Amino acid sequence: MRKKRVLSKADILAYLELLNAKLAEQGLIGEISICGGAAMALVYDARDSTYDIDAIYKPKDVLTDIIAEIAKEHELSGQWLNDDVSMFTKEFETLTSSEYLILSNLTVNAIDPEYLLVMKLLAAREDSQDLHDASTLIKHMGITSEAELFLLIDTHLGRYHPSTLLVSKEFARAAMRHIS
């Protein structure tokens, strides 16, 4: 297994271009909706890099093969672009995204900020950039109160364990303090 390496914004865009080229070679069209650190870096300019690109993509089988091929060719982690986030996005019945980049054979969408913020708040990982990311999204969305954040959490809690609600609300409070 290859070691994860940091992907800069330039790296992310270059690998997406390569993914597009490989789709074009096969005469196929693909679509990716980015979440997490890649979205924070590219769309919100909140950071310079990430370790991977969390995404939902289709056609899944074809893109999974191309992703593995790129990983091998460029000595990237097999998870450099992954759909692990799909287990969490199933919770959001009306997950929406906006076009970020349109290439000849690949459309790259970015998950809308509401859903990205909720994912960050529900994950509430202290050993990550989630707090900084959540604060950035709070500012971007113009949220000014904990009550607004709590409503987002309550609306999207889904099948998460009730204890997640308490942790997420504490994390939301910390994110609000972080922007003050």
Image (cartoon, rainbow, N blue to C red):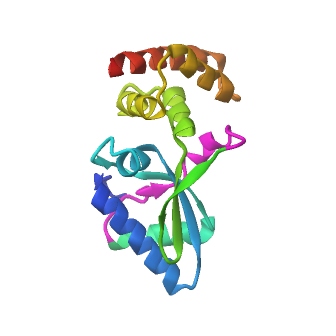
Name the spot of residue 111 as percent of width and height, x first. 54, 47
86 inside magenta stretch: yes
Residue displayed at 42% across by 60% down:
78
Residue displayed at 57% across by 65% down:
31
Using the image as rendered, state which of residue 93 and residue 72 is in the foreground.
Answer: 93
Horizontal side of residue 157 vs 105, given as left or right: right
Name the spot of residue 69 as percent of width and height, x first. 44, 73
For residue 71, what is the image quadrant?
A: bottom left
In this orientation, does residue 71 appear? no
In this orientation, does residue 98 appear? yes
User: So how many labels did they put on this image?
Assistant: 0
Q: Examine the residues drawn in magenta and state their main secondary structure.
A: loop
Q: Is residue 141 above or below residue 16?
A: above
Using the image as rendered, state which of residue 128 and residue 152 is in the foreground.
Answer: 152
Residue displayed at 38% across by 33% down:
136
**Which residues make up the magenta segment?**
74-94
Horizontal side of residue 92 vs 139, given as left or right: right
Q: Is residue 142 above or below residue 10?
A: above
Q: Is residue 91 above or below residue 29?
A: above
Name the spot of residue 38 as percent of width and height, x first. 40, 50
Residue displayed at 56% across by 20% down:
148
79 inside magenta stretch: yes
Image quarter (top left, top right, bottom left or bottom right) of the N terminus: bottom left
Name the spot of residue 89 as percent of width and height, x first. 62, 43
Horizontal side of residue 166 vs 46, given as left or right: right
Image quarter (top left, top right, bottom left or bottom right) of the C terminus: top left
Q: Is residue 32 above or below residue 124?
A: below
